[in-house]
Image: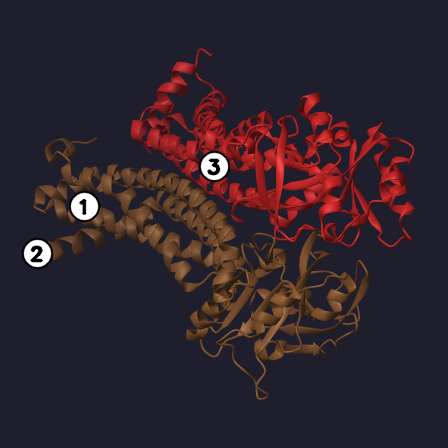
Amino acid sequence: MKYFGLVWAGLWRKKTRTVFTMISIVIAFLLFGLLQGINQGFSSALSRLDVDRLYVSARTGMTDGMPISYLSRIRNVPGVRAVSMWAYFGGYYREARNPIPAFATDAVELMKVYKEIKIRPEYIEAMAKTRTGVLVSGPLAATHGWKVGDRVPIGTSIWTNKAGSNTWEFDIVGTFDAGAYGAGFPSFYLNYSYFDEARQFGAGEIHYYIVSLQDPKQAQRISREIDDMFANSSVETRTQTESALAQSQLKQFADINFIANAIVGAVLFTLLFLTANTMMQSVRERTSELAVLKTLGYSDTKVLILVLTESLLLCMFAAALGIALAALVFESPALQKLFGEFSMPLFVAAMGAGIAVLVAFISGFPPAWRARQLNIVDALAGR
Amino acid sequence: MKMFRQIGAVTAMNFRSLPQRLSTSLVIVIGIAGVVAVLVSVLAMSTGLIRTMENTGRDDRAIVMRNGSVAETSSALDRNSARLIVDGAGIKRDAKGEPILTAETFRILMLHKKADDTEVSAILRGVGPKVLEVRPELKIVAGRMFQPAVAEVIVGKSANAQFKGLNIGDVVSSRGANWTVVGVFETGGDAHESSLMSDAETLNSIDQRGAFQSVTALLESPTAFQTFKDSLSANPALAVDVVREREYYRQQSKTMTTIISVIAYVVGGIMAVGAVFAALNTMYSAVSARLQEIATLRALGFGSTAMVMSVLAEALVLALIGGVIGALLAWAFFNGNTVSTLGGGGGLGQLVFELSVSPQLMMFGVVWACIIGLIGGLFPALRAARLPVAMALRAV
């Protein structure tokens, strides 16, 4: 630590150069923080999903639907705590451009399966009492200005009701808070009993059964049992854990991991070059100074360490700044809305620190070695 | 004239001394190459997507869906509507005087990518009997066309290449039917090549669905679109949206292309800022390494414009080299790579398209590089011009 002053002075010898190099490093790590943050955000969101929940859908595709008769059979599988079902309603409010992820379900069972959803018990009761009742998520209600007790018309392009209309009228009987689940929880639920008797076609068709397990370690066994149970029925099923489902849905979009890593790799490679160059220049300019240090008694190794420390200080300081900036960006309201409760994982900061150290060493070593090999007499003579 | 001679002389001198500053100059080249490579590669995705979308559809084809539908797959027309649409004005008629159109219906199939076994959703499009007349660009390149009333499908070229189990003779299982692949088709490199096709009536009877989802009609000419649209809107019994096929596909992919473009510009922009500072670094050290030279030249009478221009020229050339290298890298690694992603809005299923590093894109990358070089070279250039000569002539 007593050498800190020396190292610091060495860094700021050429102010502009150091500042510019630092800014480049800051920006490189800002990008790193953003990309890796998003990447890690997706994977951690995926792994946070309950492993004790299984999703059962038709093997040939979710839209093919399964019969309602499967419900009781799935419920009787040992190890199953509760079973809920979703029939996809998929409507829109006012215009097709405002889609609403709406599902028809049995509210009581739904809340048993998704125990982390916060909802007042009287709302669940109200659903049972009101045929046309619906539960909506807090944010969705806020977006459209809905309150409990409102009657809302929801249009759908798929389900014509028996009255011949494509607009269904619903009464909002309650709101819920899905914050603990995270982004992606459907925000609109109607009564399956009402939906099934009022829809013109597809009666008795369910798109998802959601199974809550007593013991998450039984997930594999129970999945297999459910699929085997319907192996020779009219509709074969496929059961997967919640995180497996989310992962496959995400992969349809893009291999985010690969893209993020590729871009970060390219950026860090060019950064390496930049930092190495800066350090090289800095050492070359100070040959006589380093020679004087050696004359004073600093050993070769000490000089090497001094240069390395300089490189380290430069990289770590700038990297910390860059990652801090990235963390700040994640806290911004725009991104919060996109990703839900999301802040940069500590893991990314740690990874960034590690990479900064690596860059510092790789770019700082050649000049440090050069400094170490400096011959005092030649250096002082300016050769 | 004197100015140009001056600029020329100083610039030439700069370049001749470049080898002395090789590693510093390489920093600009590599830094900018990186920025351009990343920018161009990511934009190549959206260019490729747009290109596939633009190829899809002709100006003289229109799609009719139910009023308010976001996509063909979420529309639903009943048989009555289908009959009324057939009577629309402006539809081209064939030799027998019948309107050339196909009433279509859709189903989503879950397939697996060959590359990493990811499960993706693909579209099975049930088409009407006149499909080959409506879509003359559809050519069977292997196997044969499907027969009506049998569970047979033909698969698009891209789907066949990217997804598992779509070779001729393979069976795709789906609820209610097992579809045998009997042929592979191409449609000139558009979105349809990522989907499968079969007969609409067969699909309907398997699904027990009473009606179609959309109608694609071949119009007499591109200008007949308005007549067609008006004749359908005027009919009170019909509640439909009529849209040009090209417009439809462009709309479908808009979200995805916007997302990709935003990512490209945000990442590229951040990298560009970093590159600007790297360039500033390099050019400042280039100038400060030659302070005495520059001061001597100024003392000799070379004007400040010449100094500024020469430094800018050096920065520009280095940036240009970096930009060209970056563009070429992107082209070499990514041009023609097939990727697939969700086409957008669920209405297109998984869309397979080629990354397209077009000449315009490469040019754009090079221009981006030059801008970075110019900004990076400007301040050092000004410094070279404003140097207090006497001070600089003394050893720094």
Question: What residue lies at 67% left-to-right and 58% top-to-bottom?
Answer: B122
Q: Is residue B129 above or below residue B253?
A: below
Tell me residue B385's x, y (percent).
Answer: 15, 41
Residue on which disc 1 sits: B308
Find the distance from the CA under tag 2 to the CA under tag 3: 47 Å
- Please determine if labels 2 and 1 lie on a single subunit: yes
Residue beneath label 2, please?
B2
Where on the picture, by quarter, is residue B170? bottom right
- The tint chain B carries is brown
Image disc number at residue A31: 3
Q: Secondary structure at mark 2?
A: helix
Residue placed at 44% from the left, 36% from the top?
A: A276
**Can you say which quadrant of the picture contains the C terminus of chain B?**
top left
State left or right for residue A106 relative to residue B395: right
**Could you tell me residue A283's position as x and y percent?**
38, 30
Residue A255 place in picture, x, y as percent: 61, 47
Write down which chain is painted red: A
Name, please, the residue furthest toward the top.
A2
Residue B17: tell me if it is visible: no
State the scheme by which the image is colored.
by chain
The subunit letter for the residue under badge 2 reads: B
